[in-house]
Image: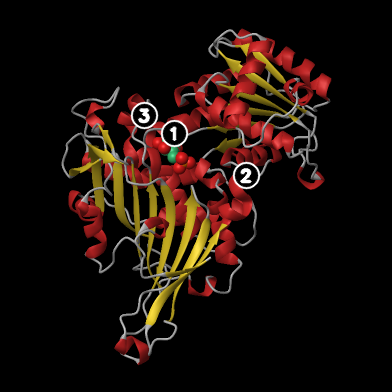
Amino acid sequence: MTVMHNHESVLADGAVFFIFGATGDLARRKLFPAIYSLYREGKLGERFAVIGLARRPRTQEQFREDVRASIDEFCRYDVQKDEDWGSFAKHFEYKPLDINNVDGFRELKEQTEHIEREFGIPGNRLFYLALAPDLFGSVSYNLRDGGLLDGTGWHRLVIEKPFGYDLPSAQKLNHELSGVFKEEEIYRIDHYLGKEMVQNIEVLRFANAFFEPLWNNKHIANIQISLAETVGVEERGGYYDQAGALRDMAQNHMLQMLTMIAMEPPSRLHPEDIRDEKVKVLRSLRQYRSMDEVHRNVVRGQYSAGVLNGKSLPGYREEEKVNPASVTETYFGARVFVDNFRWAGVPFYIRTGKRLPVKTTEVVVEFKSMPTNVYLGQKHNLEPNLLVIRVNPMEGIYVRINGKKPGSEGGIQPLAMDFCQSNMVGINTPEAYERLIFDAARGDSTYFTRWDEVASAWSFVDLIAEVWGESDKDLQLYPAGSWGPKQADELLEQDGFHWWPVNGQDESEVVWAK
Ligand code: BG6
């Protein structure tokens, strides 16, 4: 097997990874494949072990087979030879565990110490809770009471969203965790922060003379962030009907992307300095408190039956495990302001929805137009310059400028310079989870959310959720397969703007340089 060795980024002292929820979907789809990719790239070295934990009885062999099946199905690397598989699989162990029973944790401690001796790991332990958040508290207490946090190495807790349902429940959860772990030991995952192009936002902004001097309200007219999905709620109706798009996507992924776009340059490229700047953005968000403010700035939609890619689809209320009278939003759109000196007056339009026509995440930065009363502006209807950051599934950026139409007498046309990162690195771009697991194991918390960020994001979201309440006021139905309620278009039209087509679609007038 080709295990690539890049010594600068190898997990030097090794660690034991505890995967709670090891028989679940996240472990199968994301975590095991990510660990295998890291191994193949030589980033884990040989001093590591993975202990899978779940309630269900599984033998060692069955567990290793599950891991192999998950890698065969979801990993970007193939397992080629059986002996290669053997050298990887020997790092995996399974233990059935009742997470409410501390005795099981005591046994786990013994088992761990044995494994650590076997692989020469000096007590570094990473606890990954791929579990429902209401179990985080018990697991943390039992890790402590079972003795797993004693000893010499480092201990880190990695947890998945949702971090609470609102600010009070998030505070309660945080209180439980902080009774056991220090803030710097808690790694809250927002998998959008693990995406290549989200991490690239900092580089584009701070490493380019083209952009940073213009990155403010003097030159930027508006910023549009779209997180569109074609999927409905799939088999997650039970969870989703309680959450909705505001809590499921906006509170975390969307606001996190917004902070990356809007933050001030950090004083150093250190995790705490970066997170200090991000939280300032969240604190500067204009909060919508009254019915009228929410009504004017926020759009709440739910999909009804419709057609997507020629397929008839049911409405949200007909989905499994969804209340047939549900008022949960599957679309959230808003005009948001960051009330600080850099962004005063610049609208950020954000939208996310299920059952939209395409799966795409994109950020569009629309620059202010040239003056219309002088020179070319007098004669032509000049298009604004755009910087578009494509986050997924295609990764890349494009910049749209104006140029002379060749051969014409003074004609002007928009030209797009398109850089497709996906074409460069192919489908083999590392998965968000690979980066995040590796960062947590190296102790780099830059792309994890700190408690004060989470709390500020909830403060913004809670006010909107409170105004909506249980009523269906403002809830707009949109057919599955459409771009959501027309009110989301009106938000921009009121300000003299429009949503730019995603994926460069419908831009027939634009000349694309590839
Ligand atoms: C998750 C949400 O956090 O992100 C899902 O709970 C959503 O509802 C998913 O589908 C989208 O992630 P991605 O990486 O596919 O854009």
Mark 1 or 3 closer to N-term?
A: 1
Mark 2 or 3 closer to N-term?
A: 3
Rounded to the nearest angstrom, the CA distance separating label 2 from label 1 is 28 Å
Query: Residue at coordinates 54% horizontally, 11% vertically from top-left?
Result: 55
Can residue 180 be seen by looking at this rendering? no
Near mark 1 (Cα within 10 A), the count class, few <14, some 14-19 or many ≥20, is: some
At label 1, the amino acid type is Pro
Residue 410, numbered circle? none
Residue nearer the viewer, 248 or 513: 513
Please give the residue where the numbered disc 1 appears in the rendered image.
162
Secondary structure of the residue carrying numbered label 2: helix
Mark 1 or 3, closer to the camera: 3
Near mark 2 (Cα within 10 A), the count class, few <14, some 14-19 or many ≥20, is: few
Please give the residue where the numbered disc 3 appears in the rendered image.
234
Please give the residue where the numbered disc 2 appears in the rendered image.
428
Mark 2 or 1, closer to the camera: 2
Name the image quarter holding residue 467.
top left
Rounded to the nearest angstrom, the CA distance separating label 1 from label 3 is 18 Å
> Does the CB distance between marks 1 and 3 fall below 8 Å?
no
At label 3, the amino acid type is Glu
Name the image quarter holding residue 317.
top left
At label 2, the amino acid type is Asn
Give the position of the N terminus as an image quadrant.
Answer: top right
> Does the CB distance between marks 2 and 1 fall below 8 Å?
no
Query: Residue at coordinates 52% horizontally, 28% vertically from top-left?
Result: 26
Secondary structure of the residue carrying numbered label 3: loop
